[in-house]
Image (cartoon, rainbow, N blue to C red):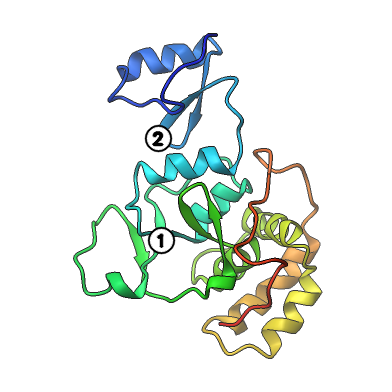
Amino acid sequence: MTSLSPPLLDAGILPVVELLALCLDGQLFRVGDAFAPIDAPDGPELRAHAFLRSAPSWAVADRGSAAWIHGTRSSPPPVPQVSVPPHRRGSALSPALDARHRSVPPDELVAVARVRVTTPLRTAVDLLSEARPFGDAQALEVRHLLALAGVAPADLDDRLRTGRRKGCVLARSRLPAVAQAALQAPARRAEPAQPTESGQPPLTR
């Protein structure tokens, strides 16, 4: 297939019927709500560009959106999951965002394309701390995120034991299931983004 521009296509460029037909022909593949040429590198940068199509540029991708960008799940959440930076608080937010008001330290962020994304370690802790159902699939996803971060479940338990952030008790209660999860190949090829500062930092919040 000849190169298509822009690298991501949506209904504003071609009718959805044509895009789906090109998928069936093996010329495109889905990237969230968009489509990419089959020869496009399927990595964090491509998924970050797709994230920007449905989230504002100021948003910090976290939780499920961050996990998808890092490559530990095959599809993004139904609506972008984001952290709202302090300078945006008090502004009206779109109902098409799953937003939370929590500051994320710079050393727990990575830059992927033009998107700020929580690190694999911070993303793992966020998912562990959420008051949502947590089963085998969620445990396996967190195990993949910890593998990207180079942190063992036992090491994370030690960090959380002395941590003061909200949800530490819940997160620690879920770590035995994470430790038992058998690592498999991620749903998409995981190419961890480079941190904004060298090394994998400890959790600060």
Q: Circles 1 and 2: CB distance less than 8 Å?
A: no
Q: Which residue is mark 1?
A: 82
Q: Nearer the viewer, residue 79 or 176?
A: 79
Q: Nearer the viewer, residue 17 or 48?
A: 48
User: Is 54 drawn above or below residue 126 in the view shown?
Assistant: above
- Residue most extreme to the front: 197
Q: Is residue 187 left or right of residue 59?
A: right
Q: Earlier in the sequence, mark 1 or mark 2?
A: 2
Q: Residue at x 65, y 40 (%)?
A: 187
Residue at 51% x, 15% y is 3
Q: Amino acid at mark 2?
A: Asp
Look at the picture and state if 173 lies above or below 186.
Answer: below
| Image disc number at residue 33 | 2
Q: Is residue 123 above or below residue 65?
A: below
Residue 104 visible (yes or no): yes
- Image coordinates for residue 154, horizontal then vertical, percent: 80, 75
Residue 26 in percent (x, y) is at 56, 13
Q: Secondary structure at mark 1?
A: strand
On the image, the x and y values in percent for residue 134 come to 59, 63
Type of the residue with mark 1:
Val
Quarter where residue 103 is shown: bottom left
Rounded to the nearest angstrom, the CA distance separating label 1 from label 2 is: 17 Å
Rendered view: 66 above or below 33: below
Quadrant housing the C terminus: bottom right
- Position of the N terminus, as image quadrant, is top right
**Image position, residue 10 (x, y; %):** 35, 26
Q: Judge left or right: residue 152 versus residue 126.
A: right
Q: Residue at x 54, y 56 (%)?
A: 111
